[in-house]
Amino acid sequence: MPNPTRAKDWVSHKLFWMRTGFKDPYSQEDQNTFAQCDAMCSGPEHVPAPTTQAQPSFCSLPVFHNPQPPDSAPGGGYVSHDGHVFLCKNPITLQQAFHVLFVVDISSSMSNRDRLPLPNTPGSELISRRHFNNRLGSVFSSLYRFWIARQAAYGAGNPLARRDAYSVIMFDRAPITCTENDFTSSPEQLLESVLQFRTGRGTNFGAAIDYARHCMERNWSSERSPVMIFLSDGECRIEEAAMQDLCRRAVVLG
C-alpha cells in the first residue's frame, strides 16, 4: 500500500469492485449486506446472554449516508445523536429516569466576569445579549447545553418523550423556585425561565439545600431517582449535617 501512514478515503464494497474492473465474487446476499451502514445500536437487548445469541440491530440506511434529522425517526424506531436510523427501541428510553434538581447560586459574586459563557456555543449569544457575561451566564450556558443534550438523546422531534423531570431553584440569602418537576418545557423555554433572574445579595447554602430537599420530597416518584446538581462559586459554607439529612431522606423515601 503506497504511503501507509497517510489517511485514506473510505470506499464502498461496490465501488471498490467497480474500480478494479473485475466481477464482484461475493453473493448477492453479501453484496446487499455490504451496501448497508454498519453502525450498530448499543441497546442491551442486542447483547448476547448465557441462553441467547446476540441479535444486533444495524442502521437501516445505506453505507456513508448523510446524518438524518432527529425528527425523521421511523415508527417504533429512533434516530441516534449522530444521525443513524434504527428500527428498534431507543436505548435511552430503557434507562433509569431522573428528577434532576438544579440548585443555582445567584449571589452577588456570581456577577464577577472572570468566567464567561463559552463563545460560539448554543445559547451563548442570547445569554450574552441579556447581560449575563459573567459567572452566572456561564452557569446558564452549561444548563442549556445539558438540556439540549438530553433532548437530543430522547429525540428532538418528540418532546413529550422526555422522562426526566427538571426543577430549578435559585438562591442568594434565600431560595426561590424557578421551575418545579417540569416534564414538557423545551430547552429554549427552560433557558428563558432562568434568564428572568438577576444576581442578589447574600449566600445561604444551608437554606438552599433544605429548600431543595423539600422539593425532592414533594415530587418523589419511585420511577425517578433524584439527582441534585449544585452550581455555585463556593463562597459560603454548609453544615455536614444538612447534607446527611438530605441523603437520609432520599434513602427513607426509597
Image (spheres, helix red, strand yellow):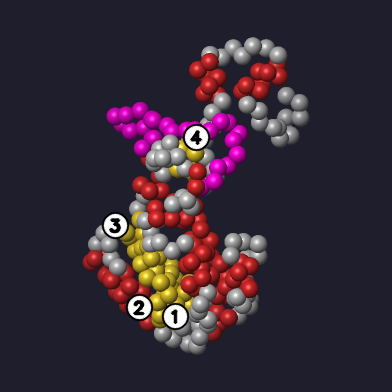
Q: Which mark is residue 211?
A: 2
> Residue 76 in magenta?
no
Mark 2 secondary-structure assignment = helix
The residue indicated by pointer 3 is 223
The residue indicated by pointer 4 is 59
Alpha-carbon neighbours of circle 1 within 10 Å: few (<14), some, or many (≥20)?
many
Name the side, left or right, on which 178 lies relative to 27: left
Q: Which marked residue is nearer to the observer: mark 2 or mark 4?
A: 4
Residue at horizontal 55 percent and vertical 42 percent from the top:
68
Q: Which residues are magenta?
A: 45-70
Mark 3 secondary-structure assignment = loop
Dominant secondary structure of the residues highlighted in magenta in the image: loop
**Distance CA(mark 1)–CA(mark 2):** 10 Å
88 w.r.t. 81: above or below: above
Name the one closer to the observer, 141 or 83.
83
The answer to which of marks 1 and 2 sits earlier in the sequence is 1
Asked if the residue at tag 2 contacts the one at tag 1, i.e. Cβ–Cβ closer than 8 Å, the answer is yes
Asked if the residue at tag 2 contacts the one at tag 3, i.e. Cβ–Cβ closer than 8 Å, the answer is no
The answer to which of marks 4 and 3 sits earlier in the sequence is 4
Give the image location of residue 26, x and y in percent.
56, 14
Asked if the residue at tag 3 contacts the one at tag 4, i.e. Cβ–Cβ closer than 8 Å, the answer is no
Quadrant where the image shows the N terminus: top right
Q: Which mark is residue 171?
A: 1
**Distance CA(mark 2)–CA(mark 4):** 46 Å
